[in-house]
Amino acid sequence: MTEWRKSSYTGGGNDDACVELAKLAGGVWVRDSKDPEGERLEFGRASFAGLLVRVKRGEFGL
């Protein structure tokens, strides 16, 4: 069974918009917490690390 985790920054309410992560042998799955049966994105470790760096820099206007 895959263990999904939400960010520690999530407020904890059921209506929080958030992503969830699941650790894979070679990377990470990412899914929308409001659509757990929906599509998943799969990232290799280096790609996911690069994504996090870009998000922290504010490159996506989040």
Image (cartoon, helix red, strand yellow):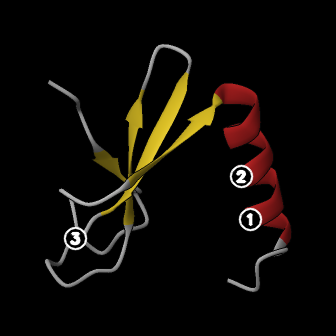
Name the outermost residue toward the top: 25
Q: Mark on residue 12?
A: 3
Above/below status of 24 relative to 61: above
Q: Residue at 86%, 67% (x, y): give it.
A: 57
Q: Are marks 3 and 2 in contact (CB under 8 Å)?
A: no
State the SS at label 2: helix
Q: Quadrant of residue 23?
A: top left
**Label 3: how many residues lie within 10 Å, few (<14), some (14-19) or many (20+)?**
few
Foreground disc of the pair 1, 3 = 1
Kind of residue at disc 1? Val
Q: Mark on residue 52?
A: 2
Give coordinates of residue 8: x percent, y percent: 40, 56
Q: Quadrant of the C terminus?
A: bottom right
Kind of residue at disc 2? Leu
Q: Earlier in the sequence, mark 3 or mark 2?
A: 3
Above/below status of 29 relative to 25: below
Q: Residue at 85%, 74% (x, y): give it.
A: 59
Give coordinates of residue 26: x percent, y percent: 56, 17
State the SS at label 1: helix
Name the outermost residue toward the front: 39
**Label 2: how many residues lie within 10 Å, few (<14), some (14-19) or many (20+)?**
few
Above/below status of 13 relative to 30: below
State the SS at label 3: loop
Q: Residue at 26%, 60% (x, y): give it.
A: 38
Give coordinates of residue 32: x percent, y percent: 34, 65
**Label 1: how many residues lie within 10 Å, few (<14), some (14-19) or many (20+)?**
few
Q: Which residue is mark 1?
A: 55
Kind of residue at disc 3? Gly
Q: Quadrant of residue 5?
A: top left
Q: Are marks 1 and 2 in contact (CB under 8 Å)?
A: yes
Distance from Cα at disc 1 to Cα at disc 2: 5 Å
